Amino acid sequence: MSVIRSVISGTGSYLPKNILTNSDLENKVDTTDEWIIERTGIKQRHIASDEQVTSDLAVEAALKALESANMSADDIDLIVLATSTPDQTFPSTATTVQRKLGITKGAAFDVQAVCSGFIYALNTADNFVKAGQAQNVLVIGAEIFSRILDWDDRTTCVLFGDGAGAAILSAEKGSGNSDDRGILAARIHSDGRYNDLLYVDGGVSSTGTVGHLRMKGREVFRHAVVNLAAVVGEVLEDCDMITDDIDWIVPHQANKRILDGTARKLKISPDKVVITVHKHANTSAASIPLALDEAVRDGRITLGQIVILEAMGGGFTWGACLLRW
Ligand code: UT7
């Protein structure tokens, strides 16, 4: 049986030039480089310049993804952009990216699932491709979390950074079995009962302000490992695969201890987990495509391998995507 598959035909990423190290943070709040490294694995984060907005970061990542796919902006007929830190309340950051890339056809919209945003965006884009409604989708995760951090709160400000990553999903014919290239399974979940464990204390219709990020870190951590291991199990089961079939896991980069804990729970070797959190901290929706782009460009991820992307974030939201590269 012939089916349409979404194949990743290009990836790109961008980190702002300005680097804020753990030592720099020691001068701002009561923290230490040792504490941050031991509890999170984070060594530094990139911070956008005052002139940059989220769509600027997104465009930089998108241009690199287009180049790696050997495509021009004109080939794109849908943009799905995941962010919790949009340029404006409206229009969507996706339509701003569309304008900046000079694209005047197709459609563009944002999705908001905080740190799971890229998985939600990828899953949405995949459904458009499979339904025959899009040929080449630009999927972006882009964030400037530095603008919603309380820089006096040591329990959160050391954890996040700014960045963007992009992937292009292209429609290709497949045979309908798990030997096909492209996305083979995707699952997304949410449970709003946990709204108050990770949130921003402001909003358009509530306070009329942007607000600051608040998190009960220990409880988020506990849920993260359980939910992530469970959803990876779901996509494996969807494809009749087992943990040993996985070549690479590219997780949302929040905390190295969460990545290690999830790998342990899944009984998968830590060597198969792509880790970039030490370089850019938690960049929310941008972190998976940042890590994916690195592992593709340095040659770790190669044709035919099984790759699982997974994330968990505010809401709670969580999800995973299994694909053959
Ligand atoms: O992207 C998805 C959402 N986010 C996450 O996945 C993050 C999930 N949570 C985490 O990564 C971890 O829970 C944290 C990194 C946030 C915290 O690590 P933890 O091991 O859970 O530490 P904790 O919150 O239990 O705090 C331990 C101690 C506390 O002191 P007391 O109460 O034991 O005296 C904190 O006040 O560490 C203290 N602490 C700090 N000390 C130095 C908290 N932040 C800092 C800091 N520097 N920056």
Image (cartoon, grey):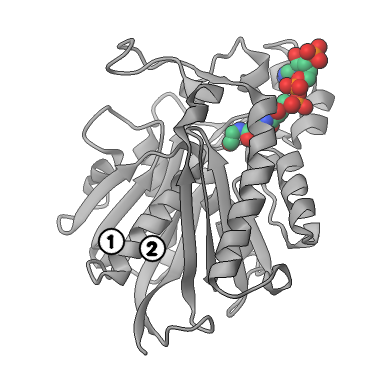
Measuring from the top left, give residue 246's x and y in whole percent: 67, 69
Q: Quadrant of ligand 1?
A: top right
* Disc on res. 73: 1
Q: Does the residue labelled 1 lie within 8 Å of ligand 1?
A: no
Measuring from the top left, give residue 19's x and y in whole percent: 62, 32
* CA distance separating discs 2 and 1: 7 Å
Relative to 78, is 324 above or below?
Answer: below
Relative to 250, is 43 above or below?
Answer: above
SS class of the residue under badge 1? helix
Residue 175 visible at all: yes
Residue 165 visible at all: no
Measuring from the top left, give residue 9's x and y in whole percent: 43, 71
- Quarter containing the N terminus: bottom left
- Quarter containing the C terminus: bottom right
Measuring from the top left, give residue 276's x and y in whole percent: 67, 48
**Closer to us: 204 or 169:** 204
Say whether residue 305 is left or right of residue 85.
right
SS class of the residue under badge 2? helix
Residue at 63% across / 31% down in the picture?
Answer: 220
Say whether residue 63 is left or right of residue 265.
left
Disc 2 residue crowd, few under 14, some 14–19, many 20+, Cα 10 Å: many
Marks 2,1: beta carbons within 8 A: yes
Relative to 184, is 161 above or below?
Answer: above
Given the current orientation, which residue lies at the most extreme front position? 193
Query: Which residue type carries mark 1?
Result: Ala
The residue tagged 2 is 66
The disc, 2 or 1, on the residue closer to the chain's N-terminal end is 2
Residue at 35% across / 88% down in the picture?
Answer: 2
